[in-house]
Amino acid sequence: MEEIVIKPQILFKDYFKVSLGLVLNRPIYWILVSSFVLMLLVVLLDPQSTFSDIGPILLWLLLFPAMMVYAVYQHVKKTIFDQPRIKEDIRFIITNDYFQEKGESFEIKYFWKDLKKITETNAYFLLFIASRKALVIRKADLDPTQYKEIRRLLGTLPIKTKLK
């Protein structure tokens, strides 16, 4: 396979959606939400409980997810709008040996053997460079030939791959 060159569009909406999904898949998030729900149930099942007992738990149950979404929103906003690299002409280069991000002032290579896993969703390929950090390849940025070549390549890699 020759190299595949992709001109990605860096869209806030897509990166926010991916980042939010990565946060919501963390076990600690679900443990905390489950703990709040369990505390709320315990208080509700107590016949002597009043709204003043339920209020703080209910407030945390509503505020915690909202704070998480807001934190992800702010992080992605800062990353996309404050990073000078994002404003450059960026290319993704994919070969049999590596995935490369190349801009006017930077060049980063990720060798396939160093990636943690690769996941395909309906709209993206997610290349996990760490357990909670993924590089995004938007399928909308690919032409049909590139899509087929990338799927074929990813299917042959010796790392954990989840393709649709």
Image (tube, rainbow, N blue to C red):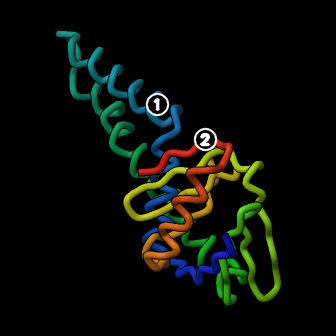
Which residue is more in the foreground, 78 or 12?
12
Q: Residues within 10 Å of mark 1 (few under 14, many from 20)?
A: some
Q: Residue at x 47, y 50 (%)?
A: 163
Q: Quadrant of residue 94?
A: bottom right
Q: Position of residue 60 (x, y in %)?
A: 39, 38
Indicate the secondary structure of the residue bearing disc 1: helix
Q: Amino acid at mark 2?
A: Lys
Which residue is depicted at the point 47% across and 64% down? 16
Q: Quadrant of the N terminus?
A: bottom right
Q: Percent x, y for residue 79?
A: 63, 71
Q: Residue at x 43, y 43 (%)?
A: 64
How far separated are the C-alphas under marks 1 and 2?
A: 28 Å
Q: Residue furthest left?
A: 47
Which residue is pictured at 71% across the width and 68% down the height? 95
Query: Where on the picture, by quarter, is residue 111?
Result: bottom right
Residue type beneath disc 1:
Leu
Q: Which mark is residue 56?
A: none
Relative to 43, 91 lies left or right: right
Q: Is residue 54 above or below residue 154?
A: above
Q: Helix or strand or loop: what does disc 2 sit on?
A: strand
Q: Which residue is mark 2?
A: 160
Q: Earlier in the sequence, mark 1 or mark 2?
A: 1
Which numbered mark, 1 or 2, is in the foreground of this view?
A: 2
Instruction: Give the image location of residue 36, x and y in percent.
Output: 38, 28
Q: Which mark is residue 32?
A: 1
In the figure, 4 relative to 151: above or below? Answer: below
Q: Position of residue 135 (x, y in %)?
A: 62, 62
Q: Front-most of 54 and 120? A: 120
> From the viewer's perspective, is 87 left or right of 142?
right
Quarter location, residue 43: top left
